[in-house]
Image: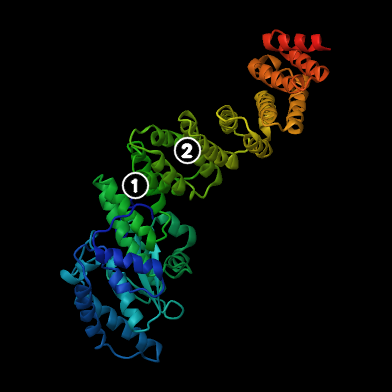
């Protein structure tokens, strides 16, 4: 927590404490450069509003009007900064408190390093005084005129060093005091030497944008809730902190909390889905979040009685935003497999094919998707009237899904399609077309070991109908040849045997 001498260790769904707070966040997201910094510092206060902010801002601005103009000489300008520093401090700062926020500063003078630095940042912006906001693991302060005078401004470290343009002897006193309060260690100071350590700590090139001060308030509040084990509020505040403050400390804290809570979720709401997605985003794959971790949560999604297919489809849209390809594809394939199996079980063949296509797009070698596609394509033929339209659709599916040819049902399906189309063509007196498909049927039966699985009734019907066409035209030789060919496939068929005998007798 910032401003403490003890180091603390350890969007998606986002709630706001007020419409005022939400307005500030939306405004910042739209334009993170031209936003109202002073107003934004009050976002964390659930009772704040525009009128109250203007009232406090007027107090600050009234004081600014009393300050002298910028001096051209270095010593005079340093003296002016000291005067401004003292005036702000004496007017607004009354009592240091670790757990305080920007609004407290104006209500009773309570402050900490974050809120004090924020007020000085606003004042310096208004007065065109250059400055850097500096951050250490547990502290924040300002450097005025960082390229020239290097004026260190401290409001919270105990001691007399609030405003410093130090000499070497003073540097040693400052660092020793930091060591005594355990803000730094003796070893790291001795490793670099006092002056080098001081330069790196206070005047190094690294500095943060003032917007981080907004986020630090939420960060501090998040840690406070974490201490009381109010994990929902802790996460909510840490999430808000991330909008303004890109500290590497936030991610591991949120991740630790979320890992503890993830197992308690039921995954029957989009809020739970969003929670999982945020954890996936901040977790390191596969070191601390593996595919097995993901699948355990996905099982909850498909097994929860309240979750409809519509809910799962909407969840898929959310999972599609996962950045890590392997994690994203695993989640999508898992959920599409469930939907495809359900659709197949319910004989909703078009949906089963649609979901299976999605699986194939993710994993062309998916055996589950291939089995479902095979079932759907052959089932559609079984439920059809075995006409030319069915054959045309089947041929398109063969081109799209070439693995269908590896299944023996491929030849059986074609045999039944060719046989029925030939039969219909004889019925409709399309003799040329009938013979064309009859020839295709015979080619399949002669070159593939499928005759025992082809419908004997279909064989009897098509060869009886074909032979009859010539029999009743008294073309008995042709009729006998057709009946006899049919008997090679169905030798015990009574109708074909009878008509073959009649034809032979007529020769």
From the viewer's perspective, is the residue at label 1 or at label 2 nearer? 2
478 left or right of 377 in image? right
Q: Within 10 Å of the Cα at label 2, are there few (<14), some (14-19), or many (20+) other Cα atoms?
A: many
Res. 360 visible in picture: yes
Q: Where is residue 458 in the image (x, y as percent from the top left)?
A: 65, 20
Q: Is residue 23 above or below residue 314?
A: below
Question: Mark 2 falls on what kind of element?
Answer: helix
Residue 245 placement, left or right of 358: left
Earlier in the chain: of badge 1 and badge 2, it is 1
Spatial CA distance of label 1 from label 2 is 18 Å
Q: Is residue 112 visible?
A: no
Q: Which residue bears the numbered disc 1? A: 271
Res 412 quadrant in image: top right
Horizontal and vertical percent position of residue 306: 33, 36
Displayed quadrant of residue 358: top right
- Which numbered dot is residue 95? none
Locate residue 464: give its quadrant: top right
> Nearest the camera: 81 or 17?
17
Please tell me how crowded label 1 is: few (under 14), some (14-19), or many (20+) other residues with Cα within 10 Å: some
SS assignment at label 1: helix
Image quadrant containing the N terminus: bottom left
Q: Marks 2 and 1: in contact by CB < 8 Å?
A: no
Split into 4 quadrants, where in the image is the C terminus?
top right
- Residue 335 — which label? 2
Above/below status of 368 relative to 92: above
Residue with the most extreme left position: 108
Q: Which of 148 and 419 is in front in this view?
A: 419
Of residues 366 and 52, the one drawn nearer to the viewer in this rendering: 366
Q: Which colour scheme is used?
A: rainbow
The location of residue 185, given as percent across then percent down, is: 39, 55
């Amino acid at each position: 927590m910032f401003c403490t001498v003890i180091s603390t260790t350890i969007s998606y769904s986002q709630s706001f404490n007020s419409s005022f707070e939400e307005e500030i966040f939306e405004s910042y997201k739209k334009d993170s450069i031209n936003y109202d910094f002073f107003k934004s510092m009050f976002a964390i206060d659930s009772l704040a509003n525009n009128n109250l902010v203007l009232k406090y801002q007027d107090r600050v601005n009234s004081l600014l009007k009393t300050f002298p103009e910028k001096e051209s000489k270095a010593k005079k300008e340093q003296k002016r900064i000291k005067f401004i520093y003292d005036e702000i401090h004496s007017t607004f700062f009354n009592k240091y408190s670790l757990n305080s926020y920007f609004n407290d500063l104006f209500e009773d003078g309570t402050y900490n390093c974050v809120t004090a630095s924020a007020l000085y940042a606003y004042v310096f912006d208004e007065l065109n005084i250059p400055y850097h906001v500096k951050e250490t693991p547990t502290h924040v302060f300002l450097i005025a005129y960082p390229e020239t005078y290097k004026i260190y401004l401290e409001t919270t470290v105990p001691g007399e060093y609030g405003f410093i343009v130090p000499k070497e002897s003073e540097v040693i006193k400052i660092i020793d005091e930091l060591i005594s309060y355990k803000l730094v260690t003796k070893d790291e100071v001795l490793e670099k030497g006092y002056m080098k350590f001081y330069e790196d700590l206070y005047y190094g090139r690294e500095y943060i944008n003032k917007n981080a001060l907004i986020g630090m308030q939420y960060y501090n509040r998040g840690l406070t809730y974490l201490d009381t084990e109010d994990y929902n509020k802790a996460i909510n505040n840490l999430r808000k902190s991330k909008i303004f403050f890109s500290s590497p400390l936030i991610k591991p804290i949120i991740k630790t909390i979320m890992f503890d809570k993830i197992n308690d979720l039921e995954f029957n709401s989009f809020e739970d889905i969003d929670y999982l997605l945020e954890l996936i985003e901040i977790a390191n794959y596969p070191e601390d979040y593996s595919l097995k971790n993901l699948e355990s949560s996905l099982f909850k999604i498909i097994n929860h009685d309240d979750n409809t297919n519509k809910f799962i489809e909407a969840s898929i849209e959310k999972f599609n935003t996962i950045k890590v390809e392997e994690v994203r594809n695993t989640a999508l394939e898992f959920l599409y497999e469930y939907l495809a199996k359900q659709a197949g079980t319910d004989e909703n063949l078009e949906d089963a094919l649609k979901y299976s296509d999605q699986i194939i797009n993710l994993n062309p070698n998916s055996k589950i998707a291939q089995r479902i596609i095979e079932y759907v394509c052959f089932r559609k033929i079984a439920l059809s009237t075995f006409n030319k339209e069915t054959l045309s659709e089947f041929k398109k599916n063969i081109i799209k899904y070439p693995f269908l040819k590896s299944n023996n049902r491929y030849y059986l399906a074609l045999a039944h399609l060719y046989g029925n189309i030939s039969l219909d063509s004889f019925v409709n007196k399309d003799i040329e077309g009938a013979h064309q498909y009859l020839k295709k049927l015979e080619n399949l039966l002669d070159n593939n070991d499928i005759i025992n699985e082809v419908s004997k009734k279909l064989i009897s019907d098509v060869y009886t109908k074909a032979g009859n066409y010539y029999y009743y035209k008294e073309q008995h030789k042709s009729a006998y040849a057709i009946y006899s060919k049919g008997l090679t496939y169905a030798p015990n068929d009574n109708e074909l045997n009878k008509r073959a005998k009649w034809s032979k007798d007529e020769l």
